[in-house]
Amino acid sequence: MNSLRGRLFAILLTATGVIWLSAVAWIYSNTHRELEHVLDTRLQEAARMVNSLVGSANMTVAMAALPGPQAEALGYERQLSCQIWSFDGRLMARSSGTPHGRLTEVPSGFSDRIVDGEPWRVYTVANEAAGIHIMVGDRLGLRDRLVSELIKGLLAPALLIAPLLGLLIWISLGRGLRPLRAMAHDVGTRDADDMSPVDAAHAPAEVKPLAEALNGLFAKVETARRHEREVTAFAAHELRTPLAGLKTQAQIAMATEDPAVRQGALQRIVLSVDRTTRLVRQLLALAKLDANGPAPAREALQAGALFDEITDSAPGTAQQVSISLDPALRSVTIQASRELLTLALRNLHENAVQHSPAGGRIVWRATASGHGIAIEDEGPGIPEDEMALVTQRFFRGRHKSAIGTGLGLAIADAAARRLGASLRLSNRADRSGLRAEIEIGP
C-alpha cells in the first residue's frame, strides 16, 4: 500500500479492532468469573433456605417455597432445581421439573455432575438432625448462555459502529494530512527558479521537520546556483581580459623589429598565460568543492613532505621570495585528507607568494597546538575592516595582487571546512605581513 492515508487508516482500524476485542475478552473473563461467584452464592442461599424451612415445616411446604424450572426464556430465578434425599438413599422430595436421578453423590458443598446428558452445578447441605441431604442445582449451560448474551450485547454495537468509526477515521486522516497536500501543491506549482521557503508557520509539529528540510534544500540549491552564476560571470570577465592581452601582445611581438619590445611582449604573454592557468585551476578546484561529494579518507601526512611537494611547483623563485620551513614542522604528522589539505595549503602559499615583496620571506610553521600548519609572509597584510571579507569569492580588497583572482583564500577556507578544520587569518604583530593557520585538531 503506497498511500500514507491508507496505511494510517489500516493501522488505526486494526489497532481499534484489537483493543475492542481485547476489551471484550477481558470483560468476558471477568464477567464469567463474577457471574460464577454470584450464582454459586445463590445456590448456597437457596439450599440454606430450604434447609431452614425443613426444620420448621414439612417438606411439601419447603419445596413449594422454591420455584421450579419454567420455560428457558424466563430469568435465572425460575431455573433452580432441588432434591431432598435421606441418608439411606431414599428420594424424599423434589421440585417440579427436577431430574429423577440423584443430582450429586457429594455429601456436602459444591460439585459438578452430568445429569441426563447436561452439566449441572450443585450445592449440597447435610441436615444431621433430619437425616437428609438437601441439593440445589442449576444447569451450567444456562450460565454460559447468560455470559454469551452479555458478550453479544457488547459485540453487536461494535459491528454497527465499526463502519461509522472507519468513516470518521478516514475523514479525520484526510483533514490531518491536509497540510502535506497543501505543501505538495505549493511545491508542485512553483517555477523552476522559485526557491522561496515553504511556509511552515501553521504546519503541524510532525510536518515542520519536512518543511524545514525542504527549506534547507532550497537554500542550498539557491546558494549553489548563485555560486554557479558568480563563477560563470567572473570567469567570462576574467578570461576575456588575459585572452585579449595575449592577442595584443602576440600582435606586438609579431609586428615589431625591436628585440627589446618583442622580449617584453613575450614576457607579458607568459604572465598572462600563468594568470589564466591559475584562474582555470582555481575555478576547477572551486567547482569540485561545490560538488560536495563524500569527504576523502584521512591518512597520516608528513608536514615536511607537503612543504616539499607544494614549494617545488610554487612560483616563488620568479618573485625572488625566500621560502623556508621551521625545523619543528618537519617531524609533525597530521591526520587529514591529502587532497583537501594540499589544496588549502597550496592556495595559502600562492597567496603569500603573490603578496610578498621581492626579497621577502615566507615561513611554514607548526601551530601552537601542534595539530596544524601556519604560513607567514612579509606582505602588506589585510586591513582589519576587510578581514571578514577576504574569504568571500572574488573579493580582492585594497591590497590586491596584479595576478590575483580573489579565489585563493576562498578556496582555502572551503577546503578547510570540508576537511573539518578551521582557517584563521591574522596580521603579524611583530612585523608587516599575514599569518594564515590551518588548525586540524587531534
Image: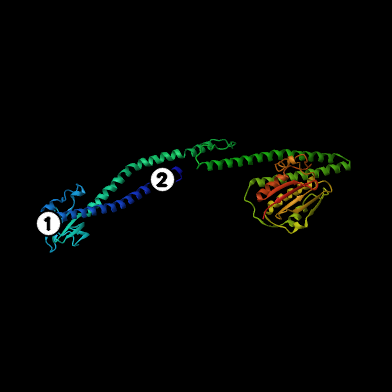
Image coordinates of residue 389 in percent, x first then y, are 71, 41
The amino acid pointed to by label 2 is Leu
Q: Quadrant of the C terminus?
A: bottom right
Image coloring type: rainbow
Q: Residue at x 30, y 44 (%)?
A: 156
Residues marked 1 and 2 touching at CB (< 8 Å): no
Q: Secondary structure at mark 2?
A: helix
- The residue closer to the viewer here, 173 or 147, is 147
**Cα distance, mark 1 to mark 2?**
61 Å
Crowd around label 1: few <14 · some 14–19 · many ≥20 (10 Å): some
The amino acid pointed to by label 1 is Ala
Image coordinates of residue 381 in percent, x first then y, are 78, 44
Q: Which residue is mark 1?
A: 93
Image coordinates of residue 338 in percent, x first then y, are 69, 54
Q: Residue furthest bottom?
A: 88
The residue mark sitting in front, 1 or 2, is: 1
Image coordinates of residue 208 in percent, x first then y, are 52, 41
Q: Which residue is mark 2?
A: 12
Q: Residue at x 14, y 56 (%)?
A: 55
- The residue closer to the viewer here, 422 or 124, is 124
